[in-house]
Amino acid sequence: MRKLDLLTPAEAMAKLSGALDAAGFGIAHGVQATEVIPTAQACHRVLARDVVSPIPMPEFRRSTVDGYAVRADATPGTLSVIGEVRMGEVASFAIRHGEAALVHTGGNLPEGADAVVMLEDAVSLTPDDRQPMQAVEGAPPSVTQQEQRKIQTGRRLAPGENVIQQGEDVRAGEVVVCAGMRLREQEIGGLLALGITQVEVVRKPRVALIASGDELVPAEAETRPGQVRNINAPMLAALVARNGGEPLDFGILPDARAAFEQAAQRAMREADMVIFMAGSSVGERDFVPDVVNAMGKPGILAHGILFRPGKPTLFALCDGKPVFGLPGNPISALVTGMLFAMPTLWRIQGVRNPPQPRFTRAVLAREVKSPRDLEHWFPVRLEEGAAPAPHEHPMPSAEPISTKSNLIFGLVRADGIACAPIGVDRLAAGTEIQVRMFD
Amino acid sequence: MRKLDLLTPAEAMAKLSGALDAAGFGIAHGVQATEVIPTAQACHRVLARDVVSPIPMPEFRRSTVDGYAVRADATPGTLSVIGEVRMGEVASFAIRHGEAALVHTGGNLPEGADAVVMLEDAVSLTPDDRQPMQAVEGAPPSVTQQEQRKIQTGRRLAPGENVIQQGEDVRAGEVVVCAGMRLREQEIGGLLALGITQVEVVRKPRVALIASGDELVPAEAETRPGQVRNINAPMLAALVARNGGEPLDFGILPDARAAFEQAAQRAMREADMVIFMAGSSVGERDFVPDVVNAMGKPGILAHGILFRPGKPTLFALCDGKPVFGLPGNPISALVTGMLFAMPTLWRIQGVRNPPQPRFTRAVLAREVKSPRDLEHWFPVRLEEGAAPAPHEHPMPSAEPISTKSNLIFGLVRADGIACAPIGVDRLAAGTEIQVRMFD
């Protein structure tokens, strides 16, 4: 690879992003197919269309407390308790000046009432002894008792006090969740609250995972000397699955051009995104660049980036399908998959709120040497309890892990990766760094 | 509730944690049942037992580059190329002093060789014209050609240069992944590399989700006036599912003690953890405290916490099963579920590396008033692109969202929640805060 031609990772991602823009991929873009699924099953799926509320929420005026529904202009004063509004029901009566009705938290406010006196603020005057009754500690009196009862409140209530108005949360006709939202628990709850039990979401993009190498055998196979197991496909499959995609395992290609060409054709038919693992460098086994350029337009956008681990990474867009050529070394494949392929997988889902990586500040425990011309990400282990918290904590120490890019256990021993940017040839011990934590 | 008796959230969690310790729940505790599943399907599952490597990794000495396997003590010098080691095979020959063999990245190193000259560092001297050949740009020559060929290298190699030794990543017999690890992509890859295609993981804890309220109807039902849809159960089910649990939806209980008692008995039979939604306060419909105290020992650990939203939250441990009484208000149920129930769900999986929340620094856009005696979490929306990055960025502005705890769309509009600690009665506009981001 000619170094002068190489893009930085940010430049390569920007170039891919521009090509995706040109191909019509934006937020909530409408390029991908959609499907309708139960709202309750839609956590972390991407909403395909704006959802408009068919009703106001709440649907009726509700009390926010246990207490007495009253007319605010009748407070302070003594009020006659004329009944109770049971949960799930509406009152058969209206509240007039001087009247009150027992209501429960979340219960319907009767006609005429415009405020609720909290139980704690009401002194119950029983008809027999007129003794103040402790309303808070015990259970409120039954309706039969209440019908004979009066309460006294010393507080002047404002209209609307302890009341949620109809439509206070959502108005009918309001856009409540926008297309492109990756749905969280609260969206699921909000949509269900409106009675929206089905949602149209972006279909999970299918991601072709194409490993290659005459030395590879399936992970479940026995190895002969010289053979190694294919671990990139299952690692990337797990990564794709938890980033909203549907992995399609294409198995292991031999180092033969015809096999790559066939796999590429099948991937263009069956997949929405393609990831080659190995074969993107410039050796005799590296068929990916030529094959990708025949897969569609605009083709290769970056071949080789100023990045470690994973300098031979290839970025392409072929007839609307992002194509990555990741290195065959497992650490390189996993790190480039995380940093470049997964954001792209979210991008083609048209997402507004993709998941963000978590960074933790740490102090580098040992010097790290870095190639000055590359953006270099190296694995680190954090040496103290490093849970970030709302308040400041002492920073953990980040121990760099010596490894080579094909020794996957270097990442097994790591809590995250940290970056020495281009132009930096060493990070001194004691440098404050940001560690991108593994999920 | 008597305020003086209430615990802070941290105290309540510590008390629950102590009770779980006493009940034998530690990291990799062996209390929960386990199951054996395919390694490739085990992402984010918790490993039940230490895994020891049956083999060294790599299994054989490998080249890290495309080049020529040589004896380091024969460099610099001119070397006879005696063959090629094809990928997936072992050499049928050994390398003697003065000899070399073509090897590929990841390929097996022949006997006798102890270093690899990179293709770029070798000048190929062809037998016919002895002209230096550009090895980098074109494909390497075929074996037949090589057998006639000599190469020249000007570099003195160190023994081991460009070689990965057998067992350099992992030694046979080494513990490679510890019990209690929540498996990430790299553990899946590492285990599969060792031929470990099945793993014993902690069985997903079953979490009983028990909603209650005469006003509630299932989310898919039509509502009559006064009724509301049960959204807490589907929200908590989604939360449980993505925190390693298996939600068991117990439906909606009427406000009747017998229904609570029956549900509690069933939950103790079928579930590993129990979440009541509503019914944990002190009103007449609040059967949870009494029922929970009959569910097992030690019973209730905290009833009511110095916390908003969710002061009536109840923490218990009943015969080895954590039991939570969460408030019925959806915002309270979801926030207390996230902050208290989910860490406990990970805890009973015996996990060493639970997922951590992501915090983002932000500047509060408006003053927030807060009850001085409560730890108060309020929803905020971030107003700028707030992607944390390895280098410093301007902080986003956090706009507090006015809401009430039963208006779920207050959280739909939010990016995260921020905390006003106990003892603070206002956070001024401009205060730097840490926002706990929703996933």
Image: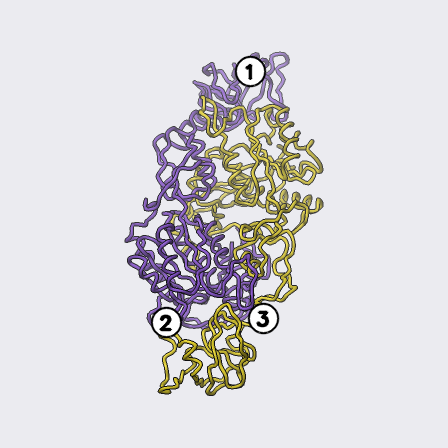
Chain colours: A purple, B yellow
**For the residue carrying disc 2, how many other residues have a C-alpha within 10 Å: few (<14), some (14-19), or many (20+)?**
some
Decide if residue A293 is on the left or right side of residue B427: left
Image mark for residue A117: none
Single out the mark in the foreground, 2 or 1: 2
Q: Is residue B329 above or below residue A386?
A: above
Total numbered labels placed on residues in the image = 3
Residue A139 shows in the view: yes
Image mark for residue A150: 1
Secondary structure at badge 3 equals loop
Horizontal and vertical percent position of residue B62: 53, 71
Pointer 1 and pointer 3 on the same chain: no
Q: Amino acid at mark 2?
A: Met
Q: Is residue A295 above or below residue A77?
A: below
Task: Tell me the chain of label 1.
Answer: A
Residue marked by disc 3: B166
Residue marked by disc 2: A1
Pointer 2 and pointer 3 on the same chain: no
